[in-house]
Image: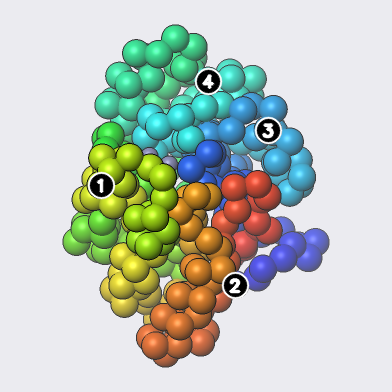
């Protein structure tokens, strides 16, 4: 894995433009163009962040949407129409967006969990995750390199484990620290929803799942979708350091995605 651009042409990589409860978007770089995965910032912010990490917005060929929540779809219609690209989503997400004025992009591609698609030279597999609205996660593969990307999931099901196996790079949700969630001023019903099987993945759930999710070829992890109020990057970092030591995986590096700043592009090939 190469962490930085060095002038020569890379075929496959991932740039997290931002991740958290207030907005999510990433660029998946392919041999034949780029994809935007979720569009949970304003179009202006999305394009500004792309330019900050030297991604030409005109290189985006399509937008993939995981689910209807506004932290994943807020800028979807405007950015899709401005870039003139189609949006790929499941029928349930289309129905949800149709209920709100001004959320529906012009060009739509309906995708089905379990049915792979090819875009930009990338083999893409959407699969169902458990969340409080119909939601999917994705794996992206080019050659032998596989990237798994799963946020907004209440628990790591057997399906999720099998789909995310063998990834060179894995982006996984660490939404909340249970003690901080309990201590927060949120209503008890919301706390239960977040921590429930159809909510979000907490730090201990994610760390526990690493035993199943790490493969011999896994090189890089990104912990994503941290709650600003109920989590702390330092807590996640210390848990991850301890967990990787416990699993005897000093070869695996990790980063923590930020709500505010893009991460540097990770090149897988
Ligand atoms: Zn979300
Ligand atoms: Zn969500």
Of the numbered discs 1 and 4, the one sitting upstream in the chain is 4
Badge 4: residue crowd in 10 Å (few <14, some 14–19, many ≥20):
many
Query: In percent of the image, x 33 and y 27: which residue is there?
Result: 93
Mark 4 secondary-structure assignment: helix
- Residue at image mark 3: 45
| Badge 2 vs badge 4, beta-carbon distance below 8 Å | no
How far is disc 3 from disc 2 in space, using C-alphas?
29 Å
Mark 2 or 4: the one toward you: 4
Badge 3: residue crowd in 10 Å (few <14, some 14–19, many ≥20):
some
- Residue at image mark 2: 1
Mark 1 secondary-structure assignment: helix
Of the numbered discs 2 and 4, the one sitting upstream in the chain is 2
How far is disc 4 from disc 3 in space, using C-alphas?
14 Å
Query: In percent of the image, x 39 and y 26: which residue is there?
Result: 109
Mark 1 or 4: the one toward you: 1
Mark carried by residue 192: 1
Mark 2 or 1: the one toward you: 1
């Amino acid at each position: 894995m190469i962490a930085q651009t060095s002038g020569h042409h890379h075929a496959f990589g991932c740039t997290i433009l931002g991740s958290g409860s207030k907005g999510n978007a990433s660029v998946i770089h392919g041999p034949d163009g780029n994809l935007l995965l979720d569009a949970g910032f304003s179009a202006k912010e999305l394009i500004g962040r792309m330019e900050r990490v030297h991604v030409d917005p005109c290189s985006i060929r399509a937008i993939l949407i995981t689910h209807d929540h506004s932290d994943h779809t807020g800028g979807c219609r405007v950015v899709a129409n401005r870039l003139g690209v189609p949006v790929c989503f499941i029928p349930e997400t289309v129905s949800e967006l149709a209920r709100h004025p001004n959320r529906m992009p012009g060009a739509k591609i309906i995708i089905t969990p379990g049915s792979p698609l090819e875009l930009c030279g990338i083999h893409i597999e959407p699969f169902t995750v458990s969340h409080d609205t119909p939601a999917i996660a994705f794996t992206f593969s080019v050659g032998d390199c596989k990237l798994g990307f799963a946020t907004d999931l209440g628990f790591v099901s057997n399906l999720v484990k099998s789909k995310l196996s063998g990834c060179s790079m894995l982006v996984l949700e660490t939404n909340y620290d249970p003690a901080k969630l309990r201590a927060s001023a949120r209503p008890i019903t919301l706390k239960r929803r977040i921590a429930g099987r159809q909510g979000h993945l907490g730090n201990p759930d994610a760390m526990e799942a690493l035993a199943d999710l790490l493969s011999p070829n896994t090189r890089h992890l990104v912990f994503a979708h941290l709650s600003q109020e109920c989590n702390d990057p330092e807590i996640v970092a210390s848990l991850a350091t301890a967990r990787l030591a416990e699993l005897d995986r000093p070869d695996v590096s990790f980063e923590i995605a930020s709500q505010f700043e893009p991460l540097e592009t990770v090149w897988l090939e």
